[in-house]
Image: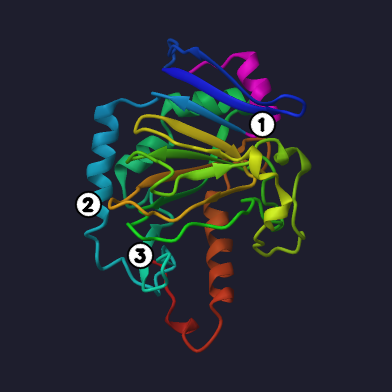
Amino acid sequence: MNFSQHSVDDSQGNVDAGRKGMVNHSGTVPLSRGQIDLWKRSGYVVIREVFTASEVAALSVDAWRLTREQHLIDRNNLRCRFRETFDGSESLWETFDPVIDLSPDCARFSGDPRLMGILHGLYGEPACLFKDKLIFKQPGTKGYELHQDWISWPGFPRSFLTVLIPIDPSTAENGCTEVFPGYHRQGPLTPQDGQYHQLPDTAVEESRCVPLELQPGDIAVFDGFTPHRSSSNRSQSWRRQLYLSYNAESDGGHQRETHYVEFHDYLQCRGAGPDRSALYFR
């Protein structure tokens, strides 16, 4: 395993640091104090070659299987999200959220000892799975505007972070996630009113943007307060990526089930109107 981390130093700009990593006897991945300190300053970390090619290949097969579950892919299914193409010509199915109950391989990745060891190193304590989704990002799909993931719902964990696990290469061309290091230390940058807010472009310095270009087997982790965005998929291929979000055990413990009850209530309220009664979860 190859650990590569980036941070923003307020006086020197981008700083890269890395070391060759080894899996210890318990199957977890030790992190150096330097890496943990950099994570605290930057709000994100990239770790190379965490998973093997065969493991990601199996995940890929299972992800393609999910695309054939046509009885689930429905605009009224709260599990699904659709996204416009960048030219506005159509709206494409993009996401299963949640996904681990549909995919045994996604479930295995969410609790993999190597991943849990990395998160333990970042938190200094065990991590609890909070949310899981698989974004398929078909060719032409529009990206996401600048935002922070943390939302001011009662009890929403401030320790929230997200792990990106690419199934396909994640590149600038196909709309990889772009992060802005260091801003997580400022906490929420939008009103704390329980609503999703896009961040204005002026909230960050464009020169600090870091594209998370990843190969299958790599992972990236970013803080819930780290501003991030993605561009449209302008390639000819799907860009499938597993998003696993966690909280520190001391910050609410296991809350995934509660989160999805609240999340579905939020989606139903947001979809209030004549078609609200048609919404369901399957």
* Comes first in the chain, label 1 or label 2: 1
Q: Secondary structure at mark 1?
A: helix
Q: Quadrant of the C terminus?
A: bottom left
Name the spot of residue 101 as percent of width and height, x first.
Answer: 36, 51
Please, which residue is most extreme toward the front here?
Answer: 207
Residue at 44% in and 18% down: 2
Residue at 48% in and 57% down: 143
| Residue 107, disc | none
Q: Are marks 1 and 2 in contact (CB under 8 Å)?
A: no
Vertical arrangement, residue 268 with respect to residue 155, above or below: below
Residue 158 sits in quarter: top right
Identify the residue position indicated by label 1 in the image.
42
Please, which residue is most extreme toward the bottom here?
Answer: 274
Residue at 75% in and 38% down: 185
| Residue 93, disc | 3
Name the spot of residue 122 as percent of width and height, x first.
Answer: 61, 26
Q: Would you say residue 38 is visible in this rendering?
A: yes
Identify the residue position indicated by label 2 in the image.
65
Name the spot of residue 118 as percent of width and height, x first.
Answer: 52, 25
Query: Which of these two is toward me, 56 or 92?
Result: 92
Q: Quadrant of the N terminus?
A: top left
The span shown in magenta is 28-43
- Residue 111 among magenta residues: no
Q: Would you say residue 124 is visible in this rendering?
A: no
Residue type pointed to by label 2: Arg
